[in-house]
């Protein structure tokens, strides 16, 4: 049985990380692919759990060796997804979730066209800016840069299969969970998962 590959994308501050964390807590059948990044850890972020934190030279070496399934430079930092293990996990029936930006999603879809894309939107630009300010981790200049990037990122929402507006965390989590459940109930997935039953009934 082949697992599903989920791509979850959102502008910074839309609540993507929180939603993904809650989804993984509720659904042990999904494994998070841990990305590499050259940015510094934020408060509470642990190596190997939030990200693999590495230096720029190490990151560029990995690009040169072709180790990344996708990579991009975002807000002055590099982010990348290691291709090692993802294909193996999917072939073994494990669902895998990638928490990446739209550029990375575009690269992944070329290699995994069946990947299920989900874009998280904020309820408004004002709310997005408030969330960024409430983090208390970014300067006014950084927030302005993130807001400009968010406008560009959200122009790519039409490239995704599902769109969730995160105006209420629980409702957004329910919507994200519904996407996962619906994908597992598709005909092809069900026929593969229950091949003996299908051959008996049909």
Image (spheres, helix red, strand yellow):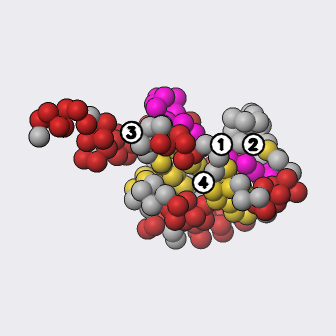
Q: For the residues carrying marks 1 and 3, which lies nearer the camera in this image?
A: 3
105 is within the stretch colored magenta: no
Q: Secondary structure at mark 4?
A: loop
Mark count: 4
- Residue 123 percent coordinates (x, y): 48, 55
Q: Examine the rendering and report whether any part of residue 6 can be seen.
A: yes
- Which residue occupies 48% across, 48% down? 5
- Which residue occupies 82% across, 60% down? 60
Instruction: Work out whether mark 1 precedes mark 3 in sequence or the reverse, and give the earlier one.
Output: 3
**Residue 34's disc number:** 1
Q: Secondary structure at mark 2?
A: strand
Task: Residue at the far left: name it.
Answer: 202
Give the labeled residue for mark 3.
Answer: 1
- Image: 142 above or below 193: below
Give the labeled residue for mark 2.
Answer: 52
- Image: 160 above or below 131: below
**Residue 100's disc number:** 4
What's the CA distance linking mark 1 and mark 2?
A: 7 Å
Indicate the quadrant where residue 71 lies: bottom right
Give the left or right position of residue 21, taking residue 196 as reference.
right
Q: Secondary structure at mark 3?
A: loop
Instruction: Work out whether mark 2 precedes mark 4 in sequence or the reverse, and give the earlier one.
Output: 2
The reply to whether callout 1 and callout 2 are in contact (CB within 8 Å) is: yes
What's the CA distance linking mark 2 and mark 4?
A: 14 Å
| Residue toward you, 31 or 132 | 31
Residue span colored magenta: 23-39
């Amino acid at each position: 049985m082949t697992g599903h590959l989920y791509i979850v994308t959102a502008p910074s501050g839309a609540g993507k990380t929180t939603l993904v964390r809650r989804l993984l807590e509720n659904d042990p059948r999904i494994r998070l692919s841990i990305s590499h990044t050259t940015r510094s850890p934020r408060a509470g972020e642990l190596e190997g759990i939030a990200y693999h934190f590495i230096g720029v030279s190490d990151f560029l070496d990995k690009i040169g060796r072709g180790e990344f399934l996708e990579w991009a430079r975002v807000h002055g930092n590099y982010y990348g997804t290691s291709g090692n293990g993802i294909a193996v996990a999917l072939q073994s029936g494990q669902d895998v979730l990638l928490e990446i930006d739209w550029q990375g999603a575009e690269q992944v879809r070329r290699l995994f066209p069946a990947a299920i894309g989900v874009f998280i939107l904020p309820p408004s630009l004002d709310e997005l800016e408030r969330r960024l300010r409430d983090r208390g981790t970014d300067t006014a200049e950084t927030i302005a840069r993130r807001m400009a990037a968010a406008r560009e990122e959200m122009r790519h929402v039409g490239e995704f299969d599902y769109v969730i507006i995160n105006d209420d965390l629980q409702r957004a989590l329910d919507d994200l969970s519904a996407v996962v459940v619906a994908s597992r109930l598709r005909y092809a997935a069900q026929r593969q998962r229950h091949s003996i039953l299908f051959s008996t009934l049909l």
